[in-house]
Image (tube, rainbow, N blue to C red):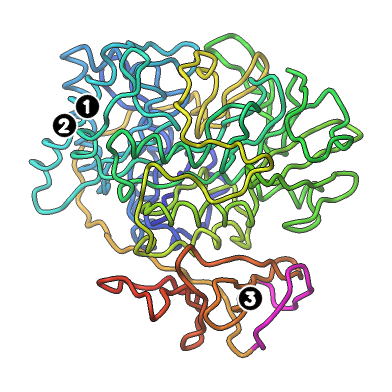
Amino acid sequence: MIVGYNPSWKAQYMAGFDYSPYTHVNMAFGIPTADGGITYDGESTLQADVDAIHSAGAQVLLSVGGWSGSSLFSTILKDDTARTAFLTNMVNLVKTYSLDGLDIDWEYPGRAGAACNVFDAANDTPNFLAFLQDLRKQLTSEFSSSDKLITMAVRVDTFEINGVPSDVSEFAKVVDYVHLMQYDINGAWMDTTGPNAPLNFETGKGYQVSFASAIDAWTSQGWPASQMTAGMPFYGRAVTATVDMTLDPTNQYQALSKVLPQGDSEDLVWADTCDNTNGYAGNWQWKYLRSEGILSDALTAASPWVRQWDDVSQTPWLFNPETKMFISYDDPKSLQAKVDYAASKGLAGTMVWSMNMEDSNNELLSVLQTFPSSGSSSSSSSSSSANNTPKDNEVDNNDPLEDDTSDDSTTEEDDTSSSSSSSSRSSSSSSSSLSSSSKSSSSSNVNKNVNLAVDPNDDQGASDGETCSTEGEYKCSDSDSPSYYFCVYGKWLELSCSTGTVCNMSSGAMVCDWPSSGQQTGDASDTIIEED
């Protein structure tokens, strides 16, 4: 399962996009209005978009909310008239545009997200549950012949009531999946540089949550791992350090300036109407890190940039000694670590923010496609933590999550800011109301498997960093080994099948398969990488 968010304000980059690697596409964002209406600035092309995505074999949901679209959830759910209209409009949207369901991205129930959001610490969480229960009833009543999805994009901590983490098991009875926004964890709102999306946090450094702790937090409060996807950022965050970080190259937590640098060429000055500030977001999309001179290949920095790898967070970071710009990001190696961990915990799959940020080679997406199609052979346990040895053996992913009000400026999935940042997930100011007229067309429930190029005739065996000649080629390292190689920009990149699976060649395709001696009961379909 690979869920991709498709931002409406990036539509110009999506022409001719291949949706087939994704199982679900969330169109972002429908914005609630005070009377319970929903606006979406991609309305004029929504039906064509839905048809194209269905033709590619993926399901389509409208995602409602987002960082800049969550200001009214709390008030709508407390007003009977607006709440009724909100429910009706959601159901009508599914009917009108032949959607496969709805994704709710409320940032955040019971606590502030953007500065102008209204929230009710005591009542948001129970009101949200009651609303979702009613939404499920209405969808079931209206679409008795087909199952419509309800999903949620959620932060690394669970929902709260008066600041206390709340049991979420009742939510899981009416919601199909939660998509964990396990990124935007450290940024310009912190006092030091740090990883955008750490697999593990480092005790005493940076914000004390992580990819691993988010999974533990939600499962410990009653959410099934099998109804959860792991959030994967296809972008990095830039800040400006106040020191030369190359003098302490094993430490990515160093003093920073609150003035954000410009990120890639799409990072334009944005005005935050909530707190009357403006500035850059400092975001670097993966597709631009190479083309705009930061990386020379997937794992090598271009001069004068220096690349470092952090063993605790299992992420790379970049530093420019001339400008003191620091970039924390994810690459194929760090995403593979996340995929392996998520699979070992029994998650359903992965989620991407956002689809438009990938490069033309799909080198990040190809890593997500190694996730076993039936999950991991390992059982999920909320009490275990990632099997990555920290520098000081003090990383504790089971620490109680802090009730820290400073976290309100830390967002998952959206760009937020200190005084001068901007949001890459703000919706366009020219939104139009969505029609509620009924249209009919069938939706597809086909889940797509991987479809990547491989030359089965090449000799197996390669070394990480050695040259290769066929871009996009895959090959197993050895028979029945989890290791395999991916040809990226003329160099072999060593990757690994998810935990418990091994690499094999089968009928001209590379397969991440359960070993024959340890096949799962039911023998679900393999993850296959085959020729186009």
Q: Quick check: 532 left or right of 43?
A: right
Would you say the magenta stretch is mainly helix, strand or loop?
loop
CB atoms of marks 1 and 3 within 8 Å = no
Compare residues 210 and 128 and report the one nearer the observer: 210
Residue under label 3, please give it: 473
Residue 268 drawn at (x, y percent): 68, 29
Alpha-carbon distance for marks 2 and 1?
A: 6 Å
Q: Residues within 10 Å of mark 1 (few under 14, many from 20)?
A: some
Q: What residue sits right under mark 1 in the picture?
A: 129
Instruction: Please give the residue where the numbered disc 2 appears in the rendered image.
Output: 133
- Residue 284, how many percent across, how many down? 68, 40
Classify 10 Å Cα crowding around label 3: few (below 14), some (14-19), many (20 and above).
Answer: some
Q: Which residues are magenta?
A: 458-471
Residue type at mark 1? Leu
Asked where in the image residue 360 lies, by quadrant, the reply is bottom right
Kindly identify the residue that appears in the image at 65 percent across and 21 percent down.
190
Instruction: Give the quadrant of the N terminus.
Output: bottom left
- Disc nearer the start of the sequence (3/2): 2
Asked if residue 167 can be seen in this view, the reply is yes
Packing grade of label 2 (10 A; few <14, some 14-19, many >=20) is some
> Is residue 63 shown left or right of residue 324?
left
Disc 2, disc 1: CB below 8 Å? Answer: yes
Label 2 secondary element: helix
User: What number is the disc on residue 157?
Assistant: none
Q: Is residue 444 above or below residue 505?
A: above
Mark 1 / mark 3, whichever is N-terminal: 1
C-alpha separation, residue under disc 3 versus residue under disc 2: 47 Å
Rendered location of residue 516, percent (x, y): 39, 81
Amino acid type at image mark 2: Gln
Say whether residue 52 is visible.
Answer: no
Residue 228: in magenta span:
no
